[in-house]
Image (cartoon, rainbow, N blue to C red):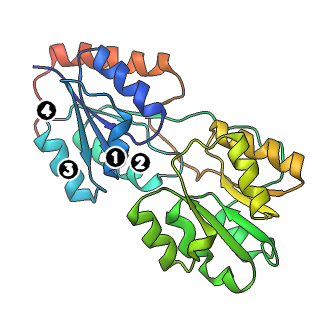
């Protein structure tokens, strides 16, 4: 029977990580928070895509039912809740845990800060602001609707639209699109809306680099929210680290009894 691994996915990198896991003959249970994210992964007999936003008990039940023997956390750098939960449960159950963290891009343009500091400042007052943070953070900006003209880019899902509307965003100030967004489209959007300030995350993607370049070219103020500080028991940022972890897992699996939950 194939060894079973929990891959916390939903990111672009998790696609090749899943392929790597399957290449080792390991059963891969990849979890995402939306049905659309399952489209990242090509069908495979050993791959199962599970859609759920885990609470602690749900995660423990998932591990038990799927006979999970290890965890690879390839979630977004800002998805601290699921990473914290996965680390806690892995430690409780004695499961090997590996964090894949994409490298951060150097911040060469604009201001680097955190969300609480930004909201306490006057940096957005009187500005035409494009938020590219995901819907989770939009509610925090609701009090600023009377002080700035706020626009937001969201995923094209019903859940995202409902969250944006609940946060007070006008439909005409929303654009719904799946990433990545090309440089040409990014530029056109900023110019169409006459954006003066863009707020983004230090995600480490090509999209972040495009924003830095355009901000310099168009003289738009760029504010980058830094990643939350996290300490992982084991971490890698490359394929070699993933493969080393998988090789160790198979070696341990060959000489260890099935996990007792």
Q: Element type at marker 2?
A: helix
Q: Which residue is mark 3?
A: 60
Q: Is residue 234 visible?
A: no
Tag 2 residue = 83
Residue 45's place in the image compared with 91, above or below, is above
The reply to whether dot 1 and dot 2 touch (C-beta < 8 Å) is: yes
Count of numbered circles on the image: 4
Numbered disc in front, either 3 or 4: 3
Residue 245: x and y in percent read 38, 21
Q: Secondary structure at mark 4?
A: loop
The residue at the point 70 percent across, 48 percent down is 186
Q: Earlier in the sequence, mark 1 or mark 4?
A: 1
Using the numbered discs, state the Cα–Cα distance from disc 3 to disc 4 in whole angstroms: 13 Å
Question: Would you name the residue on which mark 4 appears?
Answer: 259
Q: Is residue 125 above or below residue 198?
A: below
Q: Residue at x 53, y 36 (%)?
A: 101
Residue at mark 1: 86
- Which is nearer the eye, 9 or 174? 174
Residue at 61% x, 72% y: name it.
Answer: 172
**Crowd class of label 3 (few under 14; some 14 to 19; many from 20; radius 10 Å):** some
Tag 3's secondary structure?
A: helix
């Amino acid at each position: 029977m194939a060894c079973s691994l929990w891959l916390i996915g939903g990111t672009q990198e998790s696609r090749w990580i899943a392929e790597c896991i399957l290449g080792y003959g390991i059963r891969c249970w990849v979890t995402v928070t939306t049905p659309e994210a399952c489209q990242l992964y090509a069908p495979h007999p050993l791959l199962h895509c599970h859609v759920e936003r885990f609470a602690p008990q749900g995660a423990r039940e998932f591990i038990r039912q799927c006979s999970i023997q290890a965890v690879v956390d390839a979630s977004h750098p800002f998805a601290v809740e699921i990473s914290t939960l996965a680390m806690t449960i892995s430690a409780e159950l004695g499961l090997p845990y590996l964090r894949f963290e994409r490298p951060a891009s150097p911040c060469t343009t604009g201001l680097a800060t955190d969300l609480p500091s930004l909201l306490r400042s006057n940096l957005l007052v009187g500005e035409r602001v494009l938020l590219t943070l995901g819907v989770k953070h939009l509610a925090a900006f609701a009090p600023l609707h009377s002080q700035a003209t706020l626009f937001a880019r969201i995923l094209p899902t019903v859940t995202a639209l409902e969250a944006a509307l609940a946060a007070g965003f006008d439909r005409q100030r929303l654009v719904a699109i799946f990433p990545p967004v090309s440089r040409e489209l990014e530029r056109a959007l900023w110019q169409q809306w006459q954006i003066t300030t863009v707020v983004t995350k230090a995600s480490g993607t090509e999209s972040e680099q495009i924003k830095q370049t355009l901000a310099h070219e168009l003289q738009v103020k760029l504010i980058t929210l830094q990643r939350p500080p996290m300490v992982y028991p084991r971490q890698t940022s490359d394929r070699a680290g993933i493969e080393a972890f998988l090789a160790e897992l198979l070696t341990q699996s060959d000489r260890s009894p099935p996990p007792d939950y």
